[in-house]
Image: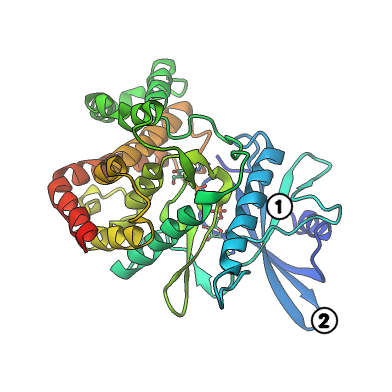
Amino acid sequence: MERAPVSPEAMRLIAARFTIPGTLVDAQPYGTGHINDTYAVTMEAGSRRTRYIFQRINTRIFTNVDALMTNISRVTAHVRSKLSAIPGADLERGTLTVIPTRDGAPYHLTPTGENWRCYLFIEGARTYDVLTKPRQAYEAARAFGMFQRMLADLPAPPLHDIIPFFHHTPRRFQKLEEALAADVRKRAGTCGVEMAFCREREPLTHTVVRDLESGAIPWRVTHNDTKINNVMLDDQTGAGIAVIDLDSVMPGSILYDFGDEMRTSIGHFAENERDLSKVFVDLEYFDQLVGGYLSATRDTLTKREIELLCFSGILITFTIGIRFLTDYLQGDVYFRTHREGENLDRARTQFALVRSIEDNRDTMEAMVQKHLRG
Ligand code: ADP
Ligand code: GN1
Ligand code: MG
C-alpha cells in the first residue's frame, strides 16, 4: 500500500515542530522499509547542514503511538546507558536518538491526524537490502546479538506488546486460510502451489509458540524485525554500529530475531526476487552469521534455544512468506508494494528459501555446533 507523498510546505511545518535548529533545505523519501514513510531531511543553520530522519508512523499498523514511542524511548535510553559504560563509544551513532517536539513530546500529531517522529541521522553508515560480503553477515549478527544482550536487564515494567501475536505462526497460518476463503481480490486461483506448500508445513508452525507457552524457552526483550536493512554498518570499518527500526521491540523469543536475520542475510537475492534459481543458502554467509551472533550471545542462550537456531530460519522465513501471501490475497493492504503481484513474488521467494534451508539443514546444524565449540 502506498501513501500520499508529503509536500515540501507540509514537511517544513512538521520540521518546525521539533527541537532542531535551522531551516529545511531538503527532504527526500528515504530507504526501502515496507511500513513507515521515511524522509531524509536536511536543515541548515548558519553554514552548518545537519540531516535528520523523519518518519510518518503507519497508524494503520501502530494504533497506539504513545505506547510505541514509550517503548522506543525506553529502549534507546537503556541502550545509550549501556554504551556510555564503554570507553570511546559513540552515543549518537550507537542507537537511535529520538528528537523531542517543542512541547517535549516524542512525536508530533499534525492537525490532519498524521503522526511524525524525528531521529538524528546516523551518518557514515548504511543499511543493505542484500549483503555483498560474508563479513557483513558477521557484523550485522553481532550487532543484533549485542542489542539483545544490552536489553536483557531492561528494568520493569515489561514493554508494551505493540503488535500482539506478531510472530505467532499458527495465527498467521489461520489468517492465511481466512484470506484464501474470503478471496476478496479473486487471486486464490493464482496461488494453489503456494497454498499446498504451506499446508504441507502446517505442523511446524507450533514449535516455538508451544515452547514459549510451556516455559521450555524464555521470553526475552527482542527486536522482532531483524531483517538486514534494520541494522547499520559503518562505511569505513564495516562494523555493525546501530540496530534501528525499533517499532516492534517487545517481549518475544530470540529465535524470532535469529530466524529473521537468517532469512535476509544468507543469500544473494532480493526479498522480491522473481528468478527463484537465485534463491538458495550461501553457507559461507550462514557460517559468518552464526559466528557473529554467538560471539555476542553464546553464554546467554539456553540449550533449547540453541537446538532451535537453524529451525528458526525455516520458521520465520515461512511465517513471513505466509504474511506476504495473506497480504497478496487481501489486496496488498499491509506491506508497501511497487508493482502488481509483488507480495506473491515475495511469498514465493520466502518459500524457496525455506526449501533451501531444509535441504542444507544438516550442514547448518554442524556449523552451529562448530561455533559453540570454538
Ligand atoms: P520501516 O519501519 O518502514 O522499515 P525504518 O525505520 O527501517 O522504516 O527506516 C527505513 C530506512 O531508513 C532504514 O532501512 C535505514 O536505511 C534508514 N534509516 C532509518 N533510521 C535511520 C537513522 N536514524 N539514520 C540513518 N538512516 C536511517
Ligand atoms: C516489515 O518495517 P520493515 O520493512 O523493516 C515488517 C516485518 C516484516 C518485513 C518483511 C511492523 O519490516 O515484520 O518481516 O517487513 N514490519 C512490521 O520485509 O510488520
Ligand atoms: Mg525497517
Residue 37 drawn at (x, y percent): 62, 50
Say whether residue 311 is visible.
yes
Q: Amino acid at mark 2?
A: Gly
Please give the name of the residue rendered at 80% of the width and 40% of the height, measured from the top-left corner.
Answer: 112
Query: What is the distance, in whole Å, between disc 2 and disc 1 at their CAs?
Result: 24 Å
Q: Quadrant of residue 54?
A: bottom right
Question: Mark 1 CB in 8 Å range of ligand 1?
Answer: no
Q: Please state which of residues 185 and 329 is positioned toward the viewer in this rendering.
A: 329
Name the image quarter holding the C terminus: bottom left
The residue lying at 53 percent from left, 33 percent from top is 333
Please name whichever residue, 284 or 78, is drawn nearer the observer in this view of the structure.
78
Q: Residues within 10 Å of mark 2 (few under 14, many from 20)?
A: few
Q: Measuring 18% from the left and 59% from the top, which residue is drawn there?
A: 370
Looking at the picture, how far across and down is residue 31, in whole percent? 54, 58
Mark 2 vs 1, N-terminal side = 2
For residue 46, which numbered disc appears in the image?
2
x and y percent of residue 325 in the render? 38, 32
| Left or right of 344, for residue 43 | right
Question: Label 1: which residue?
Answer: 117
* Relative depth, front residue between 110 and 94: 94
The answer to whether residue 133 is seen in the rendering is no
Q: Position of residue 368 (x, y in %)?
A: 22, 54
Q: Is residue 249 above or below residue 327?
A: below
Q: Quadrant of residue 199?
A: top left
Q: Tell how many labels.
A: 2
Which image quarter: residue 23?
A: bottom right
Q: Quadrant of the N terminus?
A: top right
